[in-house]
Amino acid sequence: MARRPVLKIGDPRLRQVARDVEPDEVGSLALRRLVDDMIETMRAEDGIGLAAPQIGEPLKLAVVEFEEESPRYPGMGSVSATVFINPAVTILDQAEQAFWEGCLSVPELRGVVHRPRAIRVDYLDVNGTPCAIEADGFVATVLQHELDHLQGVLYVDRMRDMRTLTTLDEYRRFWADQPVPEFE
Ligand code: NI
């Protein structure tokens, strides 16, 4: 396993649409090694998700992992390490929710993003087994954020009000314990 450098906003590779993982790649040693690298990189960077394009691999592949006890996301539920291959999102509830989002590819910033509050994701697991997960609340936001990376979309593209763009220090100072802001 190896920690890999995470591409940062401005790198054109973050803006490409990723390609499907081919059937003969699913379950291959090369793909398992890539997944291992992604999990190691996500954990080393204190991230809660990582998409393959973020380490320069233009594949429809993402990993998500976070725990309820996470000091960065207290009380937000948990997801044990999950690998999503060729994921497809279906919106189950169009009603929107707003959360602060950050991204390893957009370092030291946070911003408020509105997204549908409930989704289903159909995907293959690392063995190629078809799976589905239904999620709402913060987990739904995390999954939509990660799967956006596979379309070349970053959370800043989805921000409705750029006035909520905040450095991490100022987020902690002014907003961490407050409701999501709505400016006049
Ligand atoms: Ni991200």
Image (spheres, rainbow, N blue to C red):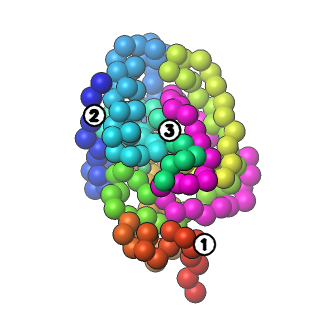
Q: First in sequence, mark 2 or 3: give its number.
A: 2
Per the model, the C-alpha gap separating discs 1 and 3 is 25 Å
Residue 74 appears in the rendering? yes
Residue 156 picture quarter: bottom left
Residue beneath label 1, please?
A: 179
Residue beneath label 2, please?
A: 3
Mark 2 touches mark 3? (CB < 8 Å): no
Q: For the magenta stretch, what is the residue range?
A: 72-101
Amino acid under disc 3: Val
Between residue 32 and residue 122, name the one nearer to us.
Answer: 32
Residue beneath label 3, please?
A: 64
The x, y position of residue 67, in whole percent, is 54, 43
Per the model, the C-alpha gap separating discs 2 and 3 is 16 Å
Amino acid under disc 2: Arg
Rendered view: 12 above or below 102: above
Q: First in sequence, mark 1 or 2: give its number.
A: 2
Which residue is at 48% across, 53% downward?
Answer: 71
Between residue 114 and residue 138, name the one nearer to us.
Answer: 138
The x, y position of residue 131, in whole percent, is 64, 25
The x, y position of residue 155, in whole percent, is 46, 57
Rendered view: 23 above or below 106: above
For the residue labelled by badge 3, is the local secondary structure a helix, a strand or a loop?
A: strand
Q: Horizontal placement of 137 versus 61: left or right?
A: right
For the residue labelled by badge 1, is the local secondary structure a helix, a strand or a loop?
A: loop
